[in-house]
Amino acid sequence: RRVVALASAWDVLVIPHGSSVYSYHLQYAFRNCPMAEFLNLSPKSDKIIPYFGSVFTDEPLPKDGFIDLPDRPGFGVTLNRQGLKRVHARPVAASEA
């Protein structure tokens, strides 16, 4: 946010690299972020798939060159809790602290 604000003061455009749901809100908020880079992560680059795979159930995707942000709290996405598991074990006592 600070970098974009500083660039805005000097009428410099900013296009964040590797845009995702987290930077789309920044880009909507500042006029000097005219576009977003969308990294196509499909194996053959023949379709648009979510940047974070199945981590979110409703990640916004570009359509006809535009992305509409959901009108929900936070970043507007829902964590897909199905299949989540900890990479490392966490003792019960650590959860209670």
Image (cartoon, rainbow, N blue to C red):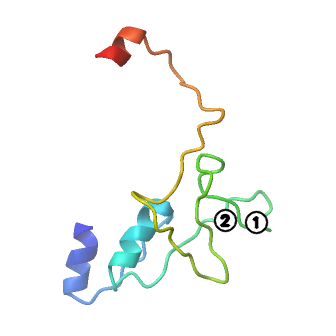
Q: Give the quarter of the image for residue 51.
A: bottom right
Q: Amino acid at mark 2?
A: Asn
Q: How many marks?
A: 2
Local SS, label 1: loop
Q: Regarding mark 2 in the picture, which secondary structure is present there? A: loop
Determine which residue is flagged by label 1. 45
- Judged left or right of residue 91, residue 37 is right
Return the residue found at the far front.
72
Q: Nearer the viewer, residue 46 or 75?
A: 75
Mark 2 residue crowding within 10 angstroms, few (<14) / some (14–19) / many (20+): some
Whether label 1 touches label 2, CB < 8 Å: yes
Q: Is residue 48 above or below residue 27?
A: above
| Quadrant of the image occupied by residue 74 | bottom left
Q: Which residue is disc 2 drawn over? A: 40
Which residue occupies the foreground of this view, 10 or 49? 49
> Looking at the image, which residue is at 77% across and 67% down?
47
Q: In the rendered image, which quarter contains the C terminus?
A: top left
